[in-house]
Image (cartoon, rainbow, N blue to C red):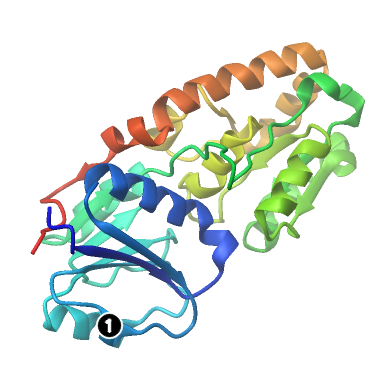
Amino acid sequence: MESSHTIHIWLGELVFMYDPLVFSAKCLLQQLYPKAIIDHQAKIIHEWSEVKRGDTVVWIGCFRFPHDELKELRERGVYTVYYNTEPAHCPCFTDEIWTYSKSLYEIHVQAYEGQIIKYMPIVCEEGDEEHQVSFVPYSETAPEKLNLSFIGNFVFRKDKQDMLMKSEILARDLEEINNLWSDKDYNNFMAKKANIYLNVTKTHFPFLPTVRINKLLSHKCIIISERTNEIDDSFYSDMVIFTDLENIPAVYESLLKKTPEELQAMADGMYEKFFEKFTSKKAVELILSRTAPIPVA
């Protein structure tokens, strides 16, 4: 690969929400194209004219999606990639479409004939001097101090929230956490005390939100998830506790009966399997693609 080839990973802000996608794209592209220059920018206004013919632009997310700019780039010989972050957002026809989900990959392959589709996994966040990753302290937290925490917003899952809140134990312990907007906030929340973490999907979209799930697993979280689909549930079966929505209160209550040491052992075991599969050097082997890799000028 030519050393002058630049891969631009760009997005229109919403930085922390998209951090796992940016981090994963960087890690995977560095593995695939070790000689390429990786340029990452998150801002409202990008200097499109500075992108050279033969470069690649990876646009992350539908927020402030630059339809006209990407079209113009393709016309002048820039390779374009759209990293789709939403289960419902209809892909545009850039040169490639990436998705975070194996199940969505299979759906897109069937739906968009002739379009290059890739499954690009969300990699395990490994701590270093610049990026700290705190682990949940299960061994230091008494079971009666645990909560069932949903990191996100129930606004698109209101029917499921209402159902769960009919449970006496969840009416007491279920909490919605939607004020973590930086790695510092996230790390501090995870390290403060242990919780069990909940995943419920957006209503009518039964796809595992691996951006949220893999970030939680990177912090050694124990996760209870409603069942999503056969592909995603099977792929994460030894890392996430899947159950029917109505059975979530019973699973949560069973975890409260475990000792802190038992919960820690469970979290450690799930993390070990997650790390083995999704560390950046391994995750590159999980990429699925219907067609060819990024071309190099």
Q: Is residue 265 above or below residue 184?
A: above
Give the image location of residue 69, x and y in percent: 28, 85
Q: Is 197 in front, or is 180?
A: 180
Residue at x-position 26% and y-position 55%: 108
Residue at x-position 34% and y-position 53%: 99
Image quadrant for the C terminus? Answer: bottom left
Amino acid type indicated by mark 1:
Glu
* Residue 218 seen from this side: yes
* Left or right placement of residue 184 versus residue 46 in this view: right
Residue at x-position 15% and y-position 48%: 290
> Number of marks in the image?
1
Give the image location of residue 262, x and y in percent: 74, 12
Residue at which label 1 appears: 50
Mark 1 element type: helix
Give the image location of residue 296, x and y in percent: 11, 59
* Left or right placement of residue 70 versus residue 202 in this view: left
Q: Is residue 44 above or below residue 275?
A: below
What is the crowding at mark 1: few (fewer than 14 residues within 10 Å), some, or many (at least 20)?
few
